[in-house]
């Protein structure tokens, strides 16, 4: 039938105002303050900026094992490594809902959906009961000791990280994606760092390499982003079943030699399906409902990374992640950044995101440790994370954001 120009114009306007179009328009902003108070409950202001980094591998033939990466001093990578081949997926939160918290659940295909939860973010209806950790809260006040920093081993000199560990700082631990910091891996002459160092087994072959574990270590981080298929050197990709078989041998060896050390799971970048398949392979007769029971191969903590710009999505994603795996959680990389999107977050947006997320993390009994990502002098070793997330500048001096992080994530008044 023939449509008049006026009618066609009306139809186009209706089409333009549908959710698909308005959501695309909302995707233009960066780090969001996510909640406005409305009476006794919080009215969640929806933002489509929330994303999770999901690496969904295709075939193992697409990737070769790197000879260098985040866990070793680079010698073969000529160009700046970036996370450009991470698959970026968005999560659609409800448009507007009055709730006390936003949680998220996973579907059978590993995707994440949002749901409202009545109660506080630390007590999710139907969630697992997680044993309290040494970082548990007391009378609503966060205990010290959760915040940490990473200093990429490619920075070579360990000295710059020492400035994060002062008597006034809330930063308590650090790592460099490797097994030690002052026993041959980094330059450390005359350097004293008054903070806990947590070593990492960057990939399956790193356990038996020539490097030694840091003397006196009490925790050990698992494989770095084995779910991520990339040629950038930031991970060693493994199929879940392959990783599980190696893990079972290695975790027995580690626990025999270091019986009191707490072991982190392989750290996700974040493919929950990969980690779910991994747990099913190492503990087929157990479940997360009781923390994987008496399975001898289970880690002590479940570990992940998360890069996004929406605070409510951040909370819901991590709550769902921990709930699915039933173990205390370590968030060893996070920042206010969304790979592959513009505009980049401003300093003020990053500062607000840090304040809100660290305050929330400190209040969760099931969060053991967390570490902001963006700590390097050489921008190459920010691995694509935008400069406004920097904790130190190109000279190694603390940025305002770095000082804020040391202040428990709270903004510092001028």
Image (cartoon, rainbow, N blue to C red):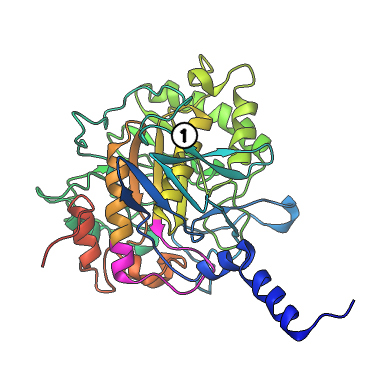
Which residue position is annotated with label 1?
322
Please name the residue shown 43% across and 66% down the image. 385
Please name the residue shown 39% across and 46% down the image. 332
Q: Quadrant of the N terminus?
A: bottom right
Q: Give the residue furthest to the right.
A: 1
Name the spot of residue 191 as percent of width and height, x first. Answer: 18, 55
Q: Is residue 238 left or right of residue 116?
A: right
Query: SS for tag 1?
Result: helix
Q: Is residue 409 left or right of residue 291?
A: left
Question: Is 262 a magenta residue?
Answer: no
Q: Does residue 376 appear anywhere in the picture?
A: no
Name the spot of residue 151 as percent of width and height, x first. Answer: 33, 57
Please name the residue shown 12% across and 51% down the image. 166
Q: Is residue 267 left or right of residue 214?
A: right
Q: Name the residue nearer the viewer: 85 or 18.
A: 18
Name the spot of residue 3 as percent of width and height, x first. Answer: 82, 80
Q: Is residue 76 above or below residue 297?
A: below
Name the spot of residue 149 as percent of width and height, x first. Answer: 30, 52
Point out the stretch of residues depicted in magenta: 335-351
Q: Is residue 355 left or right of residue 152?
A: left
Please name the residue shown 17% across and 46% down the image. 194
Q: Name the residue nearer the viewer: 318 or 156.
A: 318
């Amino acid at each position: 039938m023939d449509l008049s120009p006026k009618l066609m114009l009306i139809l186009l306007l209706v089409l333009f105002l549908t959710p698909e179009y308005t959501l695309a328009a909302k995707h233009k902003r960066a780090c969001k303050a996510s909640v406005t108070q409305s009476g006794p409950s919080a009215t969640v202001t929806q933002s489509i900026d929330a994303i999770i980094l999901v690496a969904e591998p295709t075939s193992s033939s697409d990737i070769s094992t790197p000879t260098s990466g985040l866990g070793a001093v680079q010698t073969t990578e000529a160009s700046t490594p970036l996370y450009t081949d991470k698959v970026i997926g968005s999560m659609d939160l409800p448009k507007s809902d009055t709730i006390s918290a936003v949680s998220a659940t996973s579907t059978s295909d590993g995707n994440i959906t949002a749901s409202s939860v009545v109660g506080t973010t630390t007590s999710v209806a139907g969630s697992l009961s997680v044993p309290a950790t040494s970082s548990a809260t007391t009378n609503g006040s966060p205990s010290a000791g959760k915040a940490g920093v990473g200093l990429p081993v490619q920075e070579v000199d360990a000295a710059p990280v020492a400035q994060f560990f002062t008597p006034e700082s809330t930063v308590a631990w650090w790592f460099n994606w490797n097994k030690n910091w002052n026993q041959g891996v980094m330059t450390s002459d005359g350097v004293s760092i008054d903070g806990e160092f947590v070593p990492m087994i960057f990939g399956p072959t790193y356990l038996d390499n020539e490097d030694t574990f840091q003397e006196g270590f009490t925790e050990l981080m698992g494989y770095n982003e084995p779910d991520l298929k990339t040629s950038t050197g930031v991970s060693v990709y493994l199929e879940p079943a392959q990783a599980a078989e190696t893990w079972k041998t290695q975790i027995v060896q580690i626990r025999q030699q270091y019986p009191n050390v707490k072991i982190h799971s392989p750290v996700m970048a974040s493919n929950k399906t990969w980690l779910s398949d991994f747990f099913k392979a190492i503990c087929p007769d157990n479940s997360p409902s009781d923390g994987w029971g008496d399975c001898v191969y289970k880690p002590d903590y479940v570990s992940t990374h998360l890069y996004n710009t929406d605070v409510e999505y951040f909370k819901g994603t991590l709550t769902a992640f921990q709930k699915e795996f039933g173990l205390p959680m370590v968030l060893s990389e996070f920042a206010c950044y969304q790979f592959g999107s513009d505009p980049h977050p401003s300093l003020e947006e990053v500062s607000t995101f840090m304040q809100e997320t660290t305050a929330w993390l400190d209040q969760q009994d099931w969060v053991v440790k967390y570490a902001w990502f963006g700590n390097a002098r050489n921008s190459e070793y920010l691995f694509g994370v935008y400069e406004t997330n920097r904790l130190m500048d190109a000279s190694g001096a603390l940025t305002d954001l770095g000082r804020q992080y040391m202040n428990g994530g709270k903004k510092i008044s001028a």
